[in-house]
Amino acid sequence: MFDKVVNLCWQFWNQWLKFRSVDPITSFARFLLTLGVGLMAPGGIWWLLVVFEIKPEGLPASFSVSIGPDTVTYTGLILALLGVIIGIWGLRQVNKHRKSCLIYFRGLPGMHDSPPIKDMPPKYRYGNVNSLTINTASISPEKALAEIQIFSRILNERYIDTGTDTPFLVFAGLAPVPLLYAAGVEIANRANLITMDYNRFKLKWHTLDDMDDLEDIDITFPINFSGTEIAIALPFTIDIPKSQIPNDLSDKTIWIHLSGDGPRTDAMSSSEKLNRILKKIHDLIRNLRGKDGYAQIEKVHLFIAAQASTVFKLGTEYQPNAYPTIQIYHFDSVEGKYTWHVCVQNRETFMCNVN
């Protein structure tokens, strides 16, 4: 019960308080406007004030300062007007200097046409908000990869033209695992990159704002490994039966399991947890050829059952000068097996061995 209360407080901070204050100027303007309206509001506490007199010492007895409801109302009006003026100026400054870009990846049928800007946290909705959409829902994987590569060039142009060094980039997308990974590779690990996941029950997008539960991962290496290719399986949201791994890789698979409650849909609901665990996976792949018996590794096969944001963020960690060739697989739920896959080599993404 205590953990739930702490997590609710954490969510309240991350989703509301942390993102409410856009900058000091607009926050001060909001305060003045609220105070001014409060002073003017009929039926508020201020109408209870009665006229009273202040007679400072040392002044003639006939001198008095009268403060009453009219004075309070005029004061509220002045404060409200100041709040509006400062607020307009402040918002113009925010719009000029604060820029966000929502990257919307429509990779599955039935997704909404419009980017979910309204689901972005308030902090990223203020200022100049752009949106870019990758639409690969009704095309072949080959064409989808081409669209992702074109999108990457468009994003770079938009990213440079924003006029600020580190605009906020918010990624929201659903697509087959290989395409999400490819999008992460193309977009790369930029500063101020935020990911959102889709809640199918609430039908809305959300950032990963839960508190880090400090769950770790357990890594199991194959026994007596030898060869030039290795597989890595990540069953984070649902289990991956060993029977689904291709026969030639069944005894050459590194299994990475969550050490807590096992696979589940909300396994990565904390951005801190996601970054912490993905760093360990990234370090594993990057340093794999430095491990005894693994010096000849040329290709890593990835089998991932995880949230869209997890797959995308893992793709952003790709490091061409340190990674072997990556081959990442798509699971076809109708056929009940892994079918097509995407290869990544020196940051180039392409289809490979389509079955």
Image (cartoon, rainbow, N blue to C red):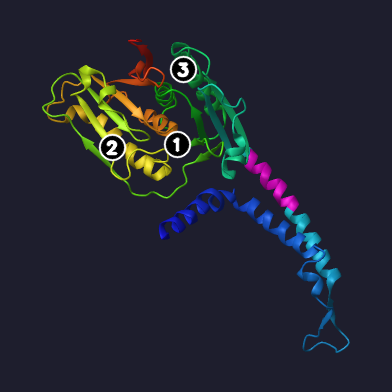
Mark sitting earlier along the chain (2/1): 1
Q: Is residue 319 visible?
A: no
Residue where numbered disc 2 is placed: 257
In the rendered structure, the answer to whether residue 1 lies left or right of residue 62 reads left
Q: Nearer the viewer, residue 210 or 38?
A: 210
Mark sitting earlier along the chain (3/1): 3
Q: CA distance from mark 3 to mark 1?
A: 20 Å
In the rendered structure, the answer to whether residue 53 lies left or right of residue 200 reads right
The residue shown at (47%, 24%) is 175
Q: Nearer the viewer, residue 320 or 140?
A: 140
- Which element type, helix, strand or loop, lies under badge 2? strand
Q: Is residue 91 magenta?
A: yes
The residue shown at (51%, 13%) is 139
Q: Amino acid under label 1? A: Ala
Q: Residues within 10 Å of mark 1 (few under 14, many from 20)?
A: few
Residue where numbered disc 1 is placed: 191
In the rendered structure, the answer to whether residue 45 lies left or right of residue 232 reads right
The residue shown at (49%, 56%) is 9
Q: Amino acid under label 2? A: His
Q: Which stretch appears magenta?
A: 84-95
Main secondary structure type of the part rendered in magenta: helix
- Which element type, helix, strand or loop, lies under badge 1? loop
User: Dividing the image into 4 quarters, which one contains the C terminus?
Assistant: top left
Q: Is residue 70 above or below residue 158?
A: below
Q: Nearer the viewer, residue 87 or 256?
A: 256
Q: Residues within 10 Å of mark 3 (few under 14, many from 20)?
A: some
